[in-house]
Image (tube, grey):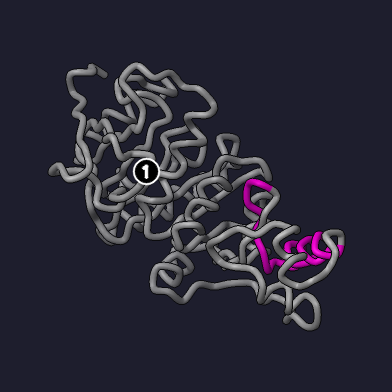
Amino acid sequence: MKSGRTQRIEPGDEGFPRRLAGLRAVRDGVHVVGTIRDLAPAVAIVGSRAASFGAMALARTLARHVGAIGGLVVSGGAIGVDTAAHVGALEARGSTTVVLGTGADIIYPERNARLFAAVVEAGGGLLSMFPLGAQPRPQNFVRRNELIAALADVVVVVAATVSSGSLHTARHALRMQRPVAAVPGTPGSDALVAAGAAVIESTDDLDRALAGDPRRLARTPLTGDLARAWDALDAIAPRDAEDLAAALAISIPSALSLLADLEATGWTLAVPGSAYVRAP
């Protein structure tokens, strides 16, 4: 892909993605190849590079459904679930956005060169927060996950390990108060479901999540100290054991124990910095 096909757009410019407005990570602008469509619903479909055939087939089906109803599919262009999502959108003659972990002039993975070209030709686009020429470094993919979450109305994690970058995307979505959904069957996805993420196993489940009526697993009601600890936590601002101990006038070891129990029963999500937020 030639760098001459890229354009740099800044907040306030025509074509700058509305959903990225106010995001510090892109305050200096982004590079785009093609068009970043402003469609609704916008659904991020993300997951493992080494997902099973069944997981990739479901990702493709979900993306095809989003495309068929006139929505936008957002993903990261990686092999595995991401590729399946982009392909599904194209099969429905829908639009899809590839959020790159490289410069907009760098094709990575190289095997997806034809896919990326097809995305642009179909009226979608490639988007990068990095300068032209930026190479595929691990930290870049972690950083770009914030953009995937920001561009979506709902984030669907199809398959993930407990250390998957897809979970970073989910945490960004929660911080932005975007709904998070997951397909059960892998450790990372199961953890999200246990923590209260919507369950997605079909296009009907996705429609429910988009309509604000997500299917969830039931959680055990809280009582006593666990209920007090839950009340002291926040859905947006993370709090660690020291914060909780001060709020409840208990020891830090006791606070750690309560936080561990809340996480194990799906009432909280762990976030970077050994802190926790309320699960959705």
Look at 70% across and 57% down and name the residue there: 240
Vertical relation: 51 (above or below) 244: above
Q: On the picture, is 123 further left or further right than 168?
A: left
Q: Is residue 260 magenta?
A: yes
Instruction: Report x, y in % for residue 255.
Output: 80, 64
Of residues 128 and 243, the one drawn nearer to the viewer in this rendering: 243
Instruction: Report x, y in % for residue 243.
Output: 70, 61
| Residue topped by disc 1 | 24
Question: In the rendered image, which quarter is residue 194 located in?
Answer: bottom right
> Which residue is outermost to the left?
14
Question: In the rendered image, which quarter is residue 270 located in?
Answer: bottom right
Tell me, yes or no, if residue 122 can be seen here: no
Q: Amino acid at mark 1?
A: Arg
Look at 73% across and 81% down and name the residue there: 221
Tell me, yes or no, if residue 80 can be seen here: yes
Q: What segment is highlighted magenta in the picture? A: 254-273
Look at 68% across and 69% down and name the residue there: 267
Of residues 270 and 64, the one drawn nearer to the viewer in this rendering: 270
* Image quadrant where one finds the N terminus: top left
Look at 35% across and 19% down and name the residue there: 106
